[in-house]
Image (cartoon, rainbow, N blue to C red):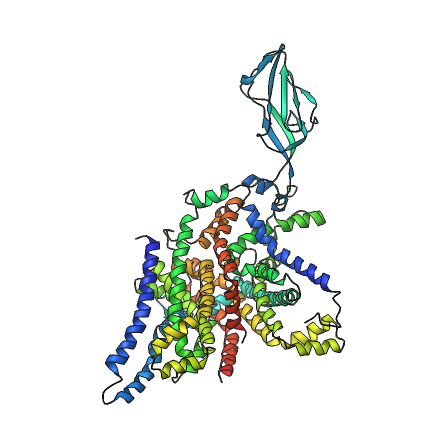
């Protein structure tokens, strides 16, 4: 069967099954199990209303538990077992093997650099863009254009930036803009930017910063507009200059939003995989955790160490997870 | 707000310029790819894309017409013609007849050949004269340095989209991506909408706990799910294929869907829902007839997110979809492969990448309003 027809059928069956499930299970509850008539009508309605939320929730809960909650525990289990020994319990052997690999420490070091640089730079550029574009007439067009990379896939972005970083042999005309500028300004030989250890990490980070700045800008710009005007007016009356207004009046008031943006980008950074996979594949000391894990799982077929790496990523995410849950609960009260 | 009485707008120009620089910086890489996708392989390899907008000076090797067309006038054998195709606005600055001296003559000068002479004008018109009959089967080579106007081609696109060549053709991967994307966008919306309604408007014990559970799952890295779920899929017979990738995307998209939709539904006016209850509507009716139509903006913003995410995804497709036959490859995977095997063929790479990002870009610019609204609902809290 042609996949397109298969896809169409899946939509029809999937959506039909979902709607059918909700409709029929509700009908069953109201008409058969606890009909709202007869001697126990009142009691039946109450009972039906106790059960109904779970009918609405069941498919979602089932999928969430199966696709996200269960894998966390299964990965934890696999990280302390060995696939070659038929899944025998090996304690922390996978972890100690992982910790003894230089590639893992390289990935950790790079990830830490990513964690510091990317959220900081994206938030800073986003804040700058938000503040500047709010003040001019063509600001909305400027915003859309800065926001645009959000729609581009990491793989597409990797191709775009590989062209920027392209290097041709010395003496020939450079087709990568970075080398063209570099050679034009300094007269040195062109550089293979992606193979320069340490620095190449920053060239990869530039790609993610380029993508994430738009996200930071959109959210921070909404927050900036939500600042009460009186506070800014009062500062102006008191003789504050534009920089003082921005750093001492506006930024402190949107600190909460800045933190949200920062943590959201932090999570993206921890999961970053496609950019490194497509541009260097972890060569030349650019390995990151997610790509290290992919290497272990699907190239080395070492599920134990791969799972251990996944657990490390999970541990790094956990503080943000706890903080988010804490905030959500505070808000619901 | 910054323009109220008493403030100077001396910084306005600085602001305009900084924004222009920022926009240029952000736009430049993408424009480079777009321009490159309309250039031939030679053009890409010999000059930077930023130079393609302007006329450029190039060294060309051209040939005059065969001696077969020579005519005899007044005791001389003559060949006349044009070096360039008709209508070409190219302008020759210097020319030569030997590869060692390509800049020996200026237009209008006459060069001595083995048999006879040749005169070349700036617009490429030439006249060869010889007292004896010219021999040989091919025309005389002429080396010219000429100013050529910008030139663009659609050839790359026709090659990438319609050639049917397995390594270069994206047409199949395009449809595969579409096949992955559409069900993976629609199904989670249906499931999440019901759950979000229950979490927003139905009273039951444990509701707050479930909301917290969804919030927690929002940040769980999907890397954790790869191996356990692949094992599960292989175990229950789904294997690698479309069904698996649809289910995986559904599962991974649900937390955001439920969270976004619940946040939106909570904000709907309580009166409407309570009036409907008093009038005897069941929860199912309230949901279908009131909540769903009112939640359209939230549904749209999640749909855009999920569409962009599934279209741009590489990891989930690599793990759950693409088997060893490669029949179900998606565009992102194919581009990564091109990067590996054809790292130097920028014309193919640029065109393929642009085909794959064009659909999300269209969706992005058409539905930007909903996207922004969704982002704000999803994170500013």
Q: Out of A164 and B147, give the one closest to the viewer.
A: B147
Q: Is residue B344 visible?
A: no
The image quadrant that residue B81 belongs to is top right
Work out whether residue B264 or residue A101 is closer to the camera in this orientation and state it: B264
Residue A158 x %, y %: 54, 55
Percent position of residue B272, x then y: 42, 79
Up the image or down, A308 lies above or below A252; here it is above
Q: Position of residue A107 (x, y in %)?
A: 54, 63
At a point 25% along the width and 83% down the height, the residue shown is A35
Q: Residue at x 48, y 53 (%)?
A: B356
The foreground one among A304 and A166 is: A166
- Which x, y percent locates residue B80? 60, 20
Left or right: A221 with respect to A25? Answer: right
**From the viewer's perspective, is residue B295 above or below residue B148?**
below
Q: Residue furthest top?
A: B75
Q: Is residue B15 left or right of residue B215?
A: right
Q: Quadrant of residue A218?
A: bottom right
């Amino acid at each position: 069967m042609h996949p397109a027809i298969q896809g169409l059928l899946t939509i029809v069956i999937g959506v039909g099954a979902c709607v059918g499930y909700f409709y029929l299970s509700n009908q069953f509850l109201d008409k058969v199990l606890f009909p709202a008539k007869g001697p126990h009508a009142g009691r039946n309605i109450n009972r039906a209303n106790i059960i109904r939320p779970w009918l609405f929730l069941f498919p979602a809960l089932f999928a969430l538990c199966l696709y996200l909650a269960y894998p966390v525990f299964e990965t934890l289990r696999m990280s302390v077992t060995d696939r070659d020994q038929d899944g025998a319990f090996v304690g922390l052997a996978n972890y100690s093997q992982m910790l003894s690999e230089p590639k893992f420490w390289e990935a950790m070091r790079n990830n830490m650099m990513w964690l510091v640089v990317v959220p900081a730079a994206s938030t800073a550029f986003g804040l700058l863009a938000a503040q500047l574009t709010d003040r001019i007439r063509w600001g909305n067009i400027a915003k859309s254009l800065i926001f645009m990379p959000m729609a581009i896939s990491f793989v597409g972005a990797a191709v775009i930036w590989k062209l920027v970083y392209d290097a041709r042999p010395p003496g020939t005309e450079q087709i990568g803009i970075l080398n063209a500028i570099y050679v034009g300004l300094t007269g040195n030989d062109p550089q293979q930017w992606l193979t320069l250890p340490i620095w190449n990490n920053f060239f990869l980070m530039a790609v993610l910063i380029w993508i994430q700045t738009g996200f930071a800008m959109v959210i921070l710009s909404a927050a900036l507009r939500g600042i009460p005007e009186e506070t800014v007016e009062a500062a102006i009356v008191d003789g504050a200059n534009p920089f003082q207004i921005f750093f001492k009046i506006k930024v402190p008031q949107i600190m909460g939003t800045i933190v949200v943006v920062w943590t959201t980008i932090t999570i993206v950074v921890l999961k970053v995989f496609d950019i490194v996979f497509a541009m260097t594949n972890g060569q030349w000391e650019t390995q990151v955790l997610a790509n290290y894990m992919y290497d272990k799982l699907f190239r080395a077929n070492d599920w134990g160490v791969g799972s251990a790496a996944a657990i490390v990523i999970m541990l790094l995410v956990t503080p943000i997870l706890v903080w988010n849950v804490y905030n959500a609960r505070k808000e619901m009260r | 707000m910054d323009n109220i009485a008493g403030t100077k707008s001396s910084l306005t120009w600085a602001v305009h310029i900084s924004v222009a620089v920022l926009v240029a910086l952000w736009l430049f890489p993408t424009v480079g790819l777009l321009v490159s996708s309309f250039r031939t392989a030679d053009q890409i390899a010999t000059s930077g894309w930023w130079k393609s907008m302007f006329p450029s000076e190039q060294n060309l090797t051209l040939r005059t017409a065969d001696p077969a067309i020579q005519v005899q006038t007044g005791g001389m054998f003559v060949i006349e013609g044009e070096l360039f195709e008709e209508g070409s606005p190219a302008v020759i600055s210097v020319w030569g007849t030997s590869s060692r001296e390509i800049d020996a003559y200026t237009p209008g000068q006459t060069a001595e050949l083995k048999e006879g002479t040749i005169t070349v004008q700036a617009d490429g018109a030439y006249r060869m004269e010889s007292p004896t009959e010219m021999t040989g089967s091919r025309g005389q080579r002429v080396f010219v340095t000429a100013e050529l106007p910008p030139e663009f081609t659609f050839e790359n696109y026709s090659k990438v989209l319609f050639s049917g060549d397995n390594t270069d053709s994206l047409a199949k991967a395009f449809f595969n991506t579409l096949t992955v994307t559409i069900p993976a966008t629609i199904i989670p919306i249906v499931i999440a909408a019901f759950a979000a309604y229950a979490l927003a408007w139905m009273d039951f014990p444990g509701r707050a706990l479930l909301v917290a559970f969804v919030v927690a799952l929002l940040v769980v890295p999907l890397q954790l799910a790869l191996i356990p779920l692949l094992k599960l899929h292989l175990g229950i017979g789904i294997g690698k294929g479309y069904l698996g990738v649809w289910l995986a995307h559904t599962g991974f998209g649900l937390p955001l869907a439920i969270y976004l939709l619940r946040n939106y539904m909570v904000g709907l006016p309580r009166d409407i829902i309570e009036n409907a209850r008093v009038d005897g509507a069941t929860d199912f009716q309230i949901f279908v007839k009131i909540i769903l139509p009112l939640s359209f903006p939230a549904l749209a913003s999640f749909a855009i997110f999920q569409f962009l995410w599934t279209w741009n995804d590489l990891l989930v497709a690599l793990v759950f979809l693409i088997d060893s036959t490669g029949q179900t490859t998606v565009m992102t995977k194919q581009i990564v492969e091109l990067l590996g095997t054809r790292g130097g063929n920028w014309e193919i790479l640029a065109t393929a990448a642009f085909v794959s990002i064009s659909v999300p870009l269209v969706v992005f610019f058409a539905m930007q309003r909903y996207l922004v609204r969704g982002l704000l609902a999803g994170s500013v809290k």
